[in-house]
């Protein structure tokens, strides 16, 4: 697998795997409780006890980074999973049905595609209130056309291939053909497009948290840490904002690189 991804693709996969492992093992690896204030360590600099110092409440920055990866990464993954299922369903229905059904779905996707994802998230949060559920729902709607448009084009090509006509002549239903033949052949493209969209979802989720409308304090979250870290940086402790921002950038770069490699293979 790593050989097929190439050197940079393999490095990106290893980095993401390491972050996921550290996230899952955070209760065992984190040196401190991420939500436990320590006024003696407020805005403390890097030290042996606190390698990345403390935030404004003295909470250990390293521990909060480990725990913060959970919400920072889980929410975008949920967004892309929902968007991939919805987008793939719409794409296959449009490609198989054609005619007016295809035209209506295509126009709907065009409308959704014209609205920035962050706008959907803000509107949903305004209706449901601040929190992760509203952000996930809003961004999932926004990312559905990113997956659907690419998959629809591929599905149209597959729809015209002889094996589809042969299955139809054998008396198989449209549902059976789509699920047993069309969908498996589209899987590499769906995976590649979903991984590519994941990087942008990470940015959008972090941006909403930065605005104070996503993950709520005191829960650790990288986007939220960038926001609170900016205040700490003005008071002489930049490590919180720098470390959280750097991790977001690394994850986005790794995901985009991996998505690019998968896209070339599909």
Image (cartoon, rainbow, N blue to C red):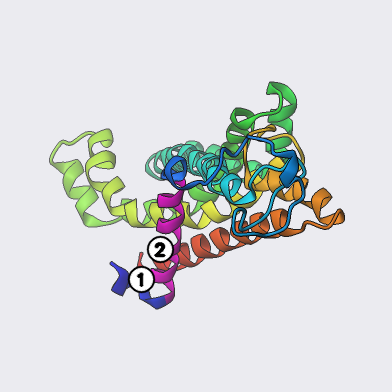
Image quadrant holding the N terminus, namely: bottom left
Most common SS among magenta residues: helix
Residue at left 78%, top 56%?
A: 237
Circle 1 residue: 5
- Residue 22 location, x and y as percent? 44, 51
**Of 115 and 58, which appears nearest the observer?**
58
Q: Name above or below for residue 73 compared with residue 217.
A: below
Circle 2 residue: 13
Based on the displayed image, in which of its 4 quarters is residue 75 positioned? top right
Residue at left 36%, top 64%?
A: 266
In the visual, does 111 lie left or right of 197?
right
Q: Are marks 2 and 1 in contact (CB under 8 Å)?
A: yes
**Of 159 and 217, which appears nearest the observer?**
217
**Of 95 and 233, which appears nearest the observer?**
233
CA distance for labels 2 and 1:
9 Å
- Residue 101 location, x and y as percent? 48, 36
- Residue 15 location, x and y as percent? 45, 63
Element type where label 1 sits in the image: helix
Q: Nearer the viewer, mark 2 or mark 1?
A: 2
Q: Tell me where the magenta segment starts and ends, as one range.
A: 8-23
Q: Name above or below for residue 84 compared with residue 260.
A: above
Q: Earlier in the sequence, mark 2 or mark 1?
A: 1
| Magenta-colored stretch includes residue 16 | yes
**Of 174 and 132, which appears nearest the observer?**
132
Element type where label 2 sits in the image: helix
In the visual, does 196 lie left or right of 244?
left
Q: Is residue 258 visible?
A: yes
């Amino acid at each position: 697998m790593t050989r097929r991804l190439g050197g940079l693709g393999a490095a990106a996969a290893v980095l993401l795997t390491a972050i996921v492992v550290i996230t899952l093992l955070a209760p065992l690896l984190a040196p401190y409780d991420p939500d436990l204030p320590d006024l003696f360590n407020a805005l403390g600099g890097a030290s042996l006890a606190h390698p990345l110092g403390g935030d404004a409440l003295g909470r250990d920055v390293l521990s909060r980074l480990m725990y913060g990866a959970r919400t920072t990464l889980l929410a975008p993954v949920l967004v892309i999973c929902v968007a991939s299922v919805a987008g793939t369903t719409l794409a296959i229905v449009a490609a198989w049905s054609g005619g007016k059904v295809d035209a209506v779905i295509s126009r709907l996707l065009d409308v959704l595609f014209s609205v920035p994802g962050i706008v959907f998230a803000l509107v949903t949060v305004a209706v449901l209130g601040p929190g992760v559920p509203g952000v996930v729902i809003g961004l999932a709607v926004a990312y559905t056309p990113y997956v659907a448009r690419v998959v629809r084009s591929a599905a149209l090509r597959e729809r015209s291939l002889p094996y589809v006509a042969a299955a139809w002549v054998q008396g198989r239903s449209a549902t059976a053909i789509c699920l047993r033949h069309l969908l498996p052949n589209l899987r590499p493209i769906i995976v590649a497009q979903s991984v590519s969209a994941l990087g942008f979802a990470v940015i959008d989720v972090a941006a909403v948290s930065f605005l104070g409308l996503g993950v709520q304090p005191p829960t650790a979250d990288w986007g939220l840490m960038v926001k609170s870290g900016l205040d700490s940086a003005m008071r002489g402790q930049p490590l919180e904002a720098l470390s959280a921002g750097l991790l977001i950038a690394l994850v986005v770069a790794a995901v985009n690189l991996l998505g690019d490699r998968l896209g070339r293979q599909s």
